[in-house]
Image: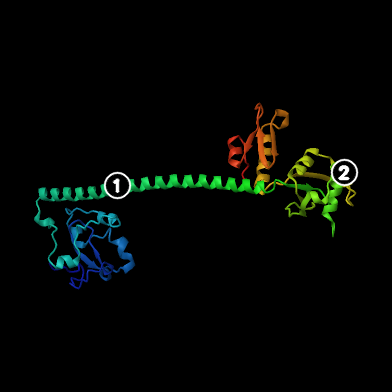
Amino acid sequence: MVVACTICQSENFSGNLRSSVRCSVLNCGSWTHAKCLGLKRKELTPFSKIFVCQRCKLESEAPITSNLVNITSNSQTSHKSSVPSPDEMASGNDTSPNPAELTDSEKLNYLIKQSLTQTSTLNSIQAEIGALTARIGSLHTAVTENQTAIQHCQEDIEGILQYQRRNNLVLNGIPEEENEDLFKIFEVFTAAAGFPLTATDLDTIHRIPTRVQNKPRPIVVRFTNRWKKEALMKKKPRLTSSDLGLPVPNLKVTYSQHLTAFQRNLLARAFDLKAQWGGAAAGAEAWQDHGRIFVKKPGDSRGTPITSINQLVQLGLRISPS
């Protein structure tokens, strides 16, 4: 079957779609050079879906369709286009009926056949979508399970880090001096607290960095005996720098458990929840015991151990957007 350009009538076709455009009318099969239409190669792809040759424009009875076969070209099930390429037409393999040779009944039957083929294609695509939807649901479940496992791992790691601090306490409010002797300072502090200690009771003592401006860095004290530390924690003396004979007078000196950064933030949010519950006047409480955080809602008889911010949110914590 001879194929010629609908404009220049040249039969010089290589079958390369990049250099020619096909009529979008069903069963037309005519091809036109891009250069004859004044088009560039990159303009052919969108133009091919709407191009109608001059002959089809004159034959108003010819059914014009969008090229639905192109929609399913990326599907795993490939379907042969109903419109042959120039090579197929030239080789005589064109099996598409000529609309001019068909009766109205034959045209109708042919369109019904094409419709059934496209319906089968759509059913295949819907089946693929269903399978992908199921796969997405399975992956979502796996992601949720992994997130839960990660959260448990983080809680375990946090518990280990806090356990390593069980022999530590943090001393705040001690002014910094050049060439200071922290062992001597802490010895004076414990004597003023009525709980004298010796150097053998301590493992190490040093200052740690802080983000708080214009305040002395906290001092971390690690005891050789945990129970000595716990006994001192129960003393709760009210001391100032003047009581310790330090050069900067009347600075409040406090001490507390050595919490991890996560636990410190968790404790701060627990105090926020306590305030939102009405504070101590309403019977709300928030505290830490041996590195564990607790809150007690007004009316409750026991405290609730807290391990995450989400848990506080579930209890009613309102977090202001930053």
Q: Mark 2 — residue?
A: 192
Residue sitting at 55 percent across and 47 percent down? 153
Q: Is residue 228 visible?
A: yes
Residue in the foreground of this view, choosing between 132 and 304: 304
Closer mark to the observer between disc 1 and disc 2:
2
Q: Quadrant of residue 76?
A: bottom left
Residue 4 picture location, percent across and down: 17, 69
Q: Please rate how many residues cluster around mark 1, counting C-alpha atoms within 10 Å: few if below 14, some from 14 to 19, many from 20.
A: few
Q: Is residue 243 left or right of residue 321?
A: right
Residue in the foreground of this view, choosing between 157 and 89: 157
Relative vertical location of residue 240 with respect to residue 176 in this rendering, above or below: above
Q: Mark 1 — residue?
A: 127
Determine whether the residue tagged by mark 2 lies in a helix, strand or loop. helix
Relative vertical location of residue 86 with respect to residue 161 in this rendering, above or below: below
Quarter containing the N terminus: bottom left
Residue sitting at 85 percent across and 49 percent down? 187
Q: Is residue 322 visible?
A: no
- Picture colour scheme: rainbow
Q: Amino acid at mark 2?
A: Ala
Count the marks.
Answer: 2
